[in-house]
């Protein structure tokens, strides 16, 4: 009969037997290692399991960031957690190493417009999006944004038939570099300043921050992103 593997001993988060300086360095190493190993932003709740109860996690993160100054990657706050990301200055080098292929498929102009409308007016149903743009927003376009993990089904709309409304996801926050939806450019301030309005939105004007994911050029002729006749 095979022996059962012994369960791992509980992690000693307090490290009370170490001098304060060594304890702090160990906590820094643990936190950075977990963030480095994770493909997604790591939340405060997860990191809190690695350190002592009296550890100030924000100061710990600040010290890690200080040590990363001058490195080609940095520790960023995104999607409600922390993640290692390469610095933008090295984007050309990374693209060259990858053979010039983009790491993420760029959004078409239509996809970018619909995604921005969902971000600002969520939860919003497809029919409401169609009314906003004055043309049909196709199921394929919505399906494409869902397949990329940028939007998800939210609550039922009070409209006839109770269709699902759509909301943005943590993947949306991560791709655009937002910590939360509060980081979206303030739409009322943009409207008051004349920088954004329905007419500008329909014309393809994007507020700062939405260029982060790299919308495709409006002449993009990729068949999977071409708008349907009379629609988006």
Image: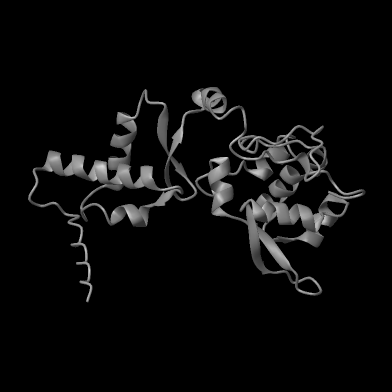
69 up-or-down from 120: above or below: above
Q: Position of residue 151 (x, y in %)?
A: 64, 55
Q: Position of residue 70 (x, y in %)?
A: 37, 23
Task: Report whether 97 appears left or right of 133.
Answer: left
Q: Colour scheme used in the picture?
A: one colour
Residue at 34% across, 30% down: 68
Task: Report whether 115 appears left or right of 133.
Answer: left
Q: Residue furthest right?
A: 230
68 up-or-down from 131: above or below: above
Q: Position of residue 29 (x, y in %)?
A: 25, 41
Between 168 and 194, the one lying in front of the other is 168
Task: Report whether 7 appears left or right of 155.
Answer: left
Residue 181 in sight in this render? no
Residue 19 in sight in this render? yes
Q: Position of residue 169 (x, y in %)?
A: 58, 55
Picture quadrant where residue 158 is located: bottom right
Residue at 68% across, 60% down: 166
Residue at 42% across, 43% down: 83
- Can you say which quadrant of the picture contains the N terminus? bottom left
Picture mark count: 0
Task: Report whether 179 appears left or right of 137.
Answer: left
Q: Residue furthest front?
A: 1
Picture quadrant where residue 21 is located: top left
92 up-or-down from 20: above or below: above
Residue at 58% across, 41% down: 176
Between 104 and 16, the one lying in front of the other is 104
């Amino acid at each position: 009969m095979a022996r059962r593997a012994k369960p791992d001993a509980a992690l000693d988060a307090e490290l009370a037997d170490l001098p304060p300086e060594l304890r702090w360095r160990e906590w820094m190493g643990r936190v950075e290692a977990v963030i480095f190993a994770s493909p997604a932003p790591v939340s405060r709740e997860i990191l809190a399991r690695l350190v002592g109860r009296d550890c100030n996690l924000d100061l710990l993160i600040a010290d890690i960031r200080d040590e990363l100054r001058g490195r080609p990657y940095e520790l960023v706050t995104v999607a409600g957690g922390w993640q290692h990301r390469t610095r933008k200055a090295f984007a050309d080098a990374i693209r060259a190493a990858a053979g010039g292929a983009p790491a993420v498929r760029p959004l078409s102009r239509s996809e970018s417009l619909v995604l921005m409308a969902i971000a600002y007016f969520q939860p919003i149903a497809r029919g409401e999006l169609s009314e906003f743009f004055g043309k049909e927003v196709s199921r394929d376009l919505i399906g494409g944004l869902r397949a990329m993990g940028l939007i998800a089904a939210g609550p039922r709309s009070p409209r006839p038939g109770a269709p699902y409304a759509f909301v943005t996801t943590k993947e949306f926050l991560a791709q655009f570099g937002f910590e939360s939806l509060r980081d979206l450019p303030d739409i009322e301030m943009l409207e008051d300043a004349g920088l954004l309005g329905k007419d500008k939105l329909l014309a393809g004007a994007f507020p700062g921050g939405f260029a982060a994911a790299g919308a495709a050029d409006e002449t993009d002729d990729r068949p999977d992103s071409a708008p349907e006749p009379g629609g988006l």
